[in-house]
Amino acid sequence: MVRAGVVNHTEKWKDSGFSEIQNPPKRYSIIDLQSLSGLNGFKDVRDCQTAHRRWVEQTFESGHTVHDDRWSEAIAVGSLAFAANVKGELGSKALHRTVEHRDGAYALREPGDAYNGDFGTKSEPLRLENTFFWNEKIAASGPTWT
């Protein structure tokens, strides 16, 4: 919401991951802070929260609040070993996904050409002249029931 210009700091958007980490709800929490802390090398949740707040503040101070598609368009982002491990854990679900290196990190993602929509002659039956418009046919012939 910061990049969209809705708020000037992520802490002002109550439904953000930042708020979930910094002010976790007493019930129905989305993020397991104990696990998140452990995965980031912290023994205490408060230490993880402090480091997280510092990382966010450093991001704002550096002006790097632009969109980074590695986080929104990838399944896993991190070291080569981490991305490769996630790919291995996904098994057959990751057959056509690749691990790419960019800007000092590795991201497990799908190939972009899967969404290009270039089907060549395979889409021939879907052309407009091969389309039957149900409502036009009914309007022209009238209902067939009484």
Image: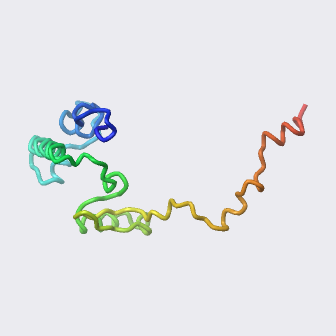
The colour scheme applied to this rendered structure is: rainbow
Give the residue at x 9% y 44%.
Answer: 47
Residue 14 coordinates in the image, percent (x, y): 27, 31
Name the residue at the front extreme: 63
Is 129 displayed left or right of 23 in the figure? right
Instruction: Give the answer, above or below, for where 19 lies relative to 55.
Output: above
Q: Residue 27: horizontal and vertical position, in percent?
A: 26, 31
Say if 55 sits above or below 119 in the image: above
Residue 94, given in percent of the width and then of the height, sits at: 41, 65
Q: Nearer the viewer, residue 64 or 81?
A: 64
Q: Nearer the viewer, residue 1 or 96?
A: 1
Quarter of the figure with residue 6: top left
Q: Is residue 110 rendered to the left or right of residue 26?
A: right
The C terminus is located in which quarter?
top right
Q: Nearer the viewer, residue 137 or 40?
A: 137
Q: Along the line of sight, which residue is nearer the eye, 95 or 68?
A: 68
Image point (70%, 57%), residue name? 126
Question: Which quadrant is the N terminus positioned in?
Answer: top left
| Quadrant of the image occupied by residue 83 | bottom left
Q: Residue at x 52, y 61 (%)?
A: 116
